[in-house]
Structure formats: structure tokens, C-alpha cells
């Protein structure tokens, strides 16, 4: 049975009920006895502080917390920022951008993020340089990819893939939630790697019918972004109930650890085989080309320079395996 980490993203800086939803979800994890791995943006940290929501920040105490970029879907996104520059220039730009997020995170929580979680579907290899410089050892939702969803190290940073996910639409419907929960629990039991990540959504998307960043789609950066329409309370409460039931089942069958605890496990790193390198080049390139089509990105964002910069670093790739004790 693999060790499991459960991820959620907290990033909506606009819609006011998203703050309470984040707090509700953090407490719900605690009540289920599950230590979550939550990704928060720098902008969300600033928003919670400016709104005086100490209670929300405190609800995350005890969970494992990562930084989810500074501003997520605001433009330029990670990929937009780094699409056209050299690797060296990109390292400087990425470090400047990510430092802002980490500083906001540290002001809010008084601690360094345990990991970096890519926003939406956007990434460039300079991120690995930036997070290392900022003392962050790992990135989740890795678009870098090796066979069997294995943990790996790339350019000195540990890449944690996201393998399973359950969506907010599933949580809001009892029948769908039941089927998806059972499907994921079943699939998890068959996993042969030592660790696996499960992504179960965004608190804000449990509360609102539309995703907060919709106004930023297609490269738009509106001055006054439109707010989303809340779900009826009944639907929100149903989602929380279904989420809680899943966490209870998960907790009874698997060891659930935060990313920080996972990084402390006895990993050992080995060079990839030729086949694993080929898999990496092909799959990672495909992931990056797919990410360029994230609806938030500006139209016709060209990922090829990012693909090249990534594949150029292939000799830094190592496969991580948990030592058998
Ligand atoms: Zn996100």
C-alpha cells in the first residue's frame, strides 16, 4: 500500500466566501484526522491578512503548507513569463516572481513553505532553480514525468507527480462522489510505488459555481474582475459532507502524510535508464505542450522554448525510490 498525500489548492483572492470555505475545509481535514497538503498563493496570503482573517490562517496550523506561486492566474503566468527568454534570464525572472510569493507566505504563516505547487497548468524549468534558491526542496503537480508516476529529482529539486484527482463537481453530487471515491480508493490500493498524491480540489470551487480565475482566461487581466456566483448553501454542505466521508475512508486504509513528512522518508536516488530518459523527454514535452493550452494562458503561447530548456537539463534527472527497511 502506498503512502498517500492529499492536496487541495487555496488561491481565490477575489470571492469573499472563499475565505470561509478554505477555513471550513482545513478544519474538516483536522476532524477527519487527515493532515492535508495545502497550496496557498502569495496573493491569497496577502488577501487573508488584509481582510484580517487570522482565523482562516490559524485553521491551517498543523497541516503541511506549500506555496502555489505568487499570483496563479494573473498574467504573466509562470509559462508566459518564461516562454521567450534564455534559461539564465529565466532563472532571474522566476526567482524574482517566486520570492514575492514566498515572502507573503512567510508573513502570513511565520514559516517557509514546505513545497511549491504549480498553478493551474503552467511551469518552466527555471522554477527548480528559483525554489532551490528559496530553500524549497520540492515541487508538486510535476509536469516533469517518469514511468509509473515515480517521484524524481530534476535540476536538484524533487518532483512529485499528481496521479489521482476528484473534482468539485463530483463532491457536489452524492452519487458521483460515491463512485469516484470508491474508484480512487480501489486504484490507490493497487498502486505499486511507495508514494502517491491525490488532488481533491479547491475550497472556493466547492462554494462557487464558477472558478475564480475565469475573468483571467485567454490572457485577460481585468481591472475589476467579475465575482463568481455562489452555490446554494445546501450544495456546499453536501460537498463538504462527501469530502469528509472520503477522507474518513482514506484515513482508515492508508498512511496519509504531509509532503514535508514524505520528503523525510528514506529516499534514495539513482540515474535513469535509457528507456526512462526517453519516457521523460517524450512525456514531459507532451505535458508542457498541453500546459500551454491551459485556458488562462494568452492565445498562441508557444511552449517550444520551454520544452527545449527542460530537455536540455535531462542529465540532471534522477529516479527516487524508497529504501526498503
Ligand atoms: Zn491552483
Image: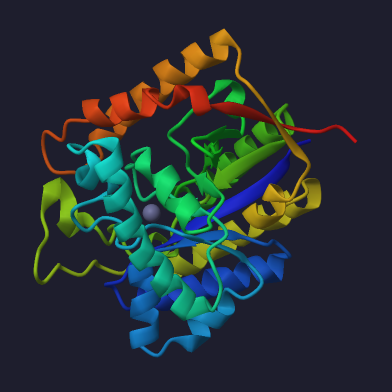
Residue 315, how many percent across, how many down? 49, 22
Residue 134's place in the image compared with 26, above or below, is: above
Residue 236's place in the image compared with 154, above or below, is: below
Give the image quadrant in which the ligand numbered 1 is located: bottom left
Seen at 68% across and 45% down, the residue is 4
Q: Residue furthest bottom?
A: 52
Residue 187, how many percent across, how many down? 65, 31
Q: Is residue 41 visible?
A: yes
Q: Quadrant of the N terminus?
A: top right
Residue 153, how many percent across, how many down? 57, 35
Q: Between 192 and 267, which is closer to the camera in this rendering?
A: 267
Question: For residue 158, which quarter of the picture?
Answer: top right
Question: For residue 46, which quarter of the picture?
Answer: bottom left
Q: Between 310 and 13, which is closer to the camera in this rendering?
A: 310
Seen at 48% across and 87% down, the residue is 54
Residue 157, how many percent across, how many down? 53, 42
Q: Is residue 173 visible?
A: no
Q: Between 258 and 106, which is closer to the camera in this rendering?
A: 106
Q: Quadrant of the C terminus?
A: top right
Left or right: 75 as drawn, with respect to 40:
left
Left or right: 263 as drawn, with respect to 46:
right
Amino acid at each position: 500500500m502506498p503512502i498517500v498525500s492529499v492536496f487541495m489548492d487555496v488561491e481565490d483572492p477575489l470571492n469573499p466566501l472563499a475565505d470561509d470555505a478554505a477555513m471550513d475545509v482545513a478544519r474538516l481535514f483536522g476532524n477527519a484526522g487527515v493532515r492535508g497538503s495545502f497550496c496557498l498563493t502569495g496573493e491569497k496570503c496577502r488577501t487573508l491578512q488584509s481582510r484580517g482573517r487570522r482565523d482562516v490562517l490559524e485553521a491551517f496550523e498543523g497541516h503541511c503548507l506549500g506555496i502555489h506561486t505568487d499570483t496563479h492566474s494573473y498574467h504573466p503566468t509562470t509559462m508566459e513569463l518564461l516562454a521567450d527568454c534564455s534559461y539564465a534570464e529565466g532563472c532571474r525572472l522566476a526567482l524574482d516572481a517566486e520570492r514575492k510569493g514566498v515572502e507573503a507566505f512567510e508573513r502570513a504563516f511565520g514559516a517557509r513553505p514546505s513545497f511549491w505547487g504549480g498553478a493551474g497548468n503552467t511551469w518552466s524549468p527555471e522554477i527548480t532553480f528559483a525554489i532551490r534558491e528559496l530553500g524549497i526542496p520540492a515541487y508538486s503537480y510535476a509536469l516533469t514525468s517518469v514511468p509509473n508516476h515515480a517521484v524524481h529529482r530534476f535540476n536538484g529539486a524533487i518532483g512529485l507527480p499528481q496521479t489521482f484527482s476528484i473534482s468539485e463537481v463530483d463532491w457536489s453530487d452524492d452519487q458521483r462522489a460515491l463512485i469516484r471515491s470508491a474508484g480512487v480508493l480501489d486504484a490507490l490500493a493497487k498502486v505499486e510505488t511507495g508514494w502517491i498524491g491525490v488532488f481533491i480540489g479547491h475550497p472556493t470551487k466547492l462554494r462557487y459555481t464558477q472558478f475564480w480565475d475565469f475573468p483571467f482566461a485567454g490572457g485577460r487581466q481585468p481591472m475589476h474582475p467579475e465575482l463568481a456566483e455562489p452555490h446554494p448553501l445546501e450544495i456546499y454542505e453536501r460537498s463538504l459532507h462527501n469530502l469528509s466521508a472520503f477522507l474518513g475512508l482514506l484515513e482508515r486504509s492508508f498512511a496519509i502524510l504531509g509532503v514535508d513528512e514524505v520528503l523525510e522518508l528514506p529516499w534514495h536516488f539513482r540515474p535513469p535508464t535509457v528507456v526512462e530518459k526517453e519516457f521523460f523527454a517524450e512525456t514531459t514535452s507532451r505535458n508542457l505542450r498541453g500546459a500551454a493550452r491551459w485556458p488562462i494562458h494568452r492565445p498562441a503561447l508557444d511552449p517550444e522554448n520551454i520544452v527545449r530548456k527542460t530537455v536540455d537539463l535531462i542529465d540532471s534527472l534522477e529516479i527516487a525510490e524508497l529504501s526498503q527497511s
